[in-house]
Amino acid sequence: MLRPIGVADYEMLRYLEQQEDLVGSWRHGGATPSPDQWAHGLWAGVLAQFIVVDVAKDLPLGLVCAYEADARNRHCSIAATKFDIRDRSTGFIRSVGLFIDYLFTNWDFRKLYFETGNRSLDFFRSAVGDLLTEEGRLCGHRFSNGKYEDLIILSLYRDVWEERVEPFRQFL
């Protein structure tokens, strides 16, 4: 399930952002802004964002966010952060699909952009080429976990999504 973020979630999100597995890839990149600056940063440039929740366990699984929406050129960037990267259940991935569907249903975007590093790309590498298109790569661009890694820019086109999602829609 996708649940809107409330002020009551801020403490949990600030804590999770500093966890070793997430600190390098999350919005503030390890910085610890004041609570007011942190809350402002959480919402700066955001179109829509939700906490992904496992309904059966009432457990937050991650965060999905759409930001830098460009209505004129009909694209938007999205981010998805899984709180426990060791969890291999499909709930988080299904919720990311639900979020993508939400964005394409409610706005006239022609494509969505994802930015990722080499390490994170491994989690969804199988979708590149079939569902996602690599549109750019900035080599050695981002410092994360003690080393430089590529910043990979992927896109998902609306027509590709609509063509491929229908058989899976019942699972979203």
Image: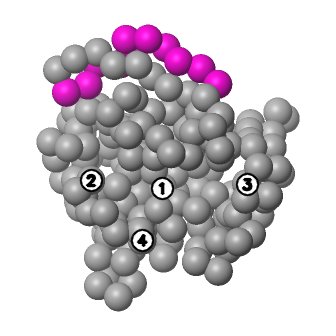
Residue lying at 44% horizontally and 11% vertically, measured from the top left: 139
Amino acid type of the residue tagged 3 in the rendering: Trp
Amino acid type of the residue tagged 4 in the rendering: Gly
Amino acid type of the residue tagged 2 in the rendering: Ile
What is the crowding at mark 3: few (fewer than 14 residues within 10 Å), some, or many (at least 20)?
some
Q: Pointer 3: what residue?
A: 161
Q: Is residue 83 visible?
A: yes
> Between marks 3 and 1, how big is the CA–CA gap?
18 Å
Callout 3 secondary element: helix
Going by the image, does 113 lie left or right of 106? left
Q: Are marks 3 and 1 in contact (CB under 8 Å)?
A: no
Q: Do the residues labelled 2 and 3 touch (CB within 8 Å)?
A: no
Residue 139 falls inside the magenta stretch: yes
What is the crowding at mark 4: few (fewer than 14 residues within 10 Å), some, or many (at least 20)?
some
> Between marks 4 and 1, how big is the CA–CA gap?
13 Å
Amino acid type of the residue tagged 1 in the rendering: Val
Q: Pointer 1: what residue?
A: 64
Residues in magenta, as a range: 135-145
Give the percent coordinates (x, y) of residue 121. Answer: 42, 37
